[in-house]
Image (cartoon, helix red, strand yellow):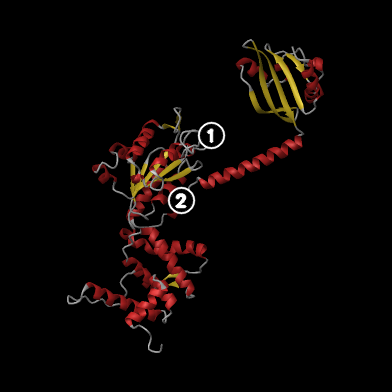
Amino acid sequence: MIPDLLVSDLLDTSAMTAIIVCNNGTVVFINKTYLDVLGKKKEEVVGKNVGDITPESRTLTVLRTGKAIVGYNWSVNGYNMIACALPIIKDGKVVACFAYSLFMDIWDAKDLVNNLMSELNMYRDEVRNLYSARHGFSEIIGQARNIQDMKFMAQKAALHPSITVLVTGESGTGKELFAHAIHKASSRSRMPFIRVNCAAIPENLLEAELFGYEEGAFTGSRKGGNPGKFELANGGTIFLDEIGEMSTSMQSKLLVFLQEKEFERLGSNHPIRVNVRIIAATNRNLEEMITQQKFREDLYYRLNVLTLDIPPLRNRIEDIPLLVNYLITKLNIDLKTNVVSMSDEALDLLSKYNWPGNIRELVNALQRAMLLADMGNYNIINAKHLYFLKINLDNVNLSLSSTKTLKMQLRCYEKQILSKVLEETNYNKRKTASILDVDLSSLYKKIKQYGLQPDDA
């Protein structure tokens, strides 16, 4: 039954254990290495049922199913091995099973396993960092009633990990922050959080980005295909930012996924079923887009299970002191500055500003003011560090006149602002240019144009 040369090779090798079991489970061959591992003599094994020798043997499964089992861990008497069990087929029938194991010293095996586990943990941590929520509810700062209401609703949404959430609001209000916080506080928190900016991905690539593709699906497709974001987010949350920018054709495909909870990769007809929560966000008026036939009404109602409408900063001005204190602490670390607070006058100026860019603009304004303060060796932000906001300055008097053209009045206003800031900086032109956000060369031209040199220049 077994070629003599093959038997000879198996008998001679000490790097591999080998056994052949016929279709009734009887051992018909075993090599010396395997006998040594078992601690048995040949007559104690050959002719016996393999289940009596090694009850966990995979050979019986292979004989029953006719399918090979490859690369499994096999431990016998304290020896760790990597094993394979292969069916021997004759005339279309399974007549026997040949099983072999690569034999390794136990300490080498431990080192190998430890090295593999260390590498696996490293990759796992990298994936978690790449696809994890970075912000929690503690970072949503504010005592205003409107923001507190939205925070409360978001915390309730976190407790229901399957409902779809639509986050609306102006640019810079913190819509993504809410999405991160909902995922992080939910039972999905250990699974991926994946963000997709629908406005940043070209329409012809968005489908492949979301649903993935098979090899050869299109010119330039990666060998072996590529999983999409929905596949990667399985078990977790996918955050579709700027959903209002999605084309109507892609809206239709997203609607099908929301209804069926499954999709097909590009170039495949095999459905993939996943379990993900969708959080969508937009700064556009989707109801208005529906009337303009730019957004599907049925998709809107699928997304609009729970809506969080994040208020703009100008509608919760009372939160500015809290936000400033929180952000100064964070920004000091990033900017390597040592600013401790902001003066009441500076806070008053912030409260008078309209904040079209909302929290994002406040962060940028604070970064700049902190750098300006640090450059002047201040540890408190004063009003003069915030002139670049172009707000009304206390000591600049704008008198409108019906006899002057708009151009003349704007020049008059510009001259007063330049004069005031130059005085505040002791005519430090570089610092003045930085505060007013103008080129140094332009500032020199303006100073000459308006005759703003100091008397002792």
Placement of the C terminus among the 4 image quadrants: bottom left
**Residue 137 visible in this rendered orientation of the protein:** yes
Q: Which of 121 and 228 is in front in this view?
A: 228
Residue that badge 1 annotates: 224
| Circle nearer the N terminus (1, 2) | 2
Say which residue appears at 36% left-offset and 80% top-offset. Answer: 447
Q: Position of residue 399 (x, y in %)?
A: 23, 77
**Taking 396 as reference, is 155 left or right?**
right
Residue type beneath disc 1: Gly
Determine the secondary structure under disc 2: loop
Q: Is residue 282 above or below residue 445?
A: above
Mark 2 closeness class: few <14, some 14–19, many ≥20 residues within 10 Å: some
Placement of the N terminus among the 4 image quadrants: top right
**Taking 395 as reference, is 323 left or right?**
right
Q: Position of residue 67 (x, y in %)?
A: 61, 19
Residue that badge 2 annotates: 136
Q: Position of residue 343 (x, y in %)?
A: 40, 72
Q: Is residue 328 above or below residue 188?
A: below
Number of disc labels: 2
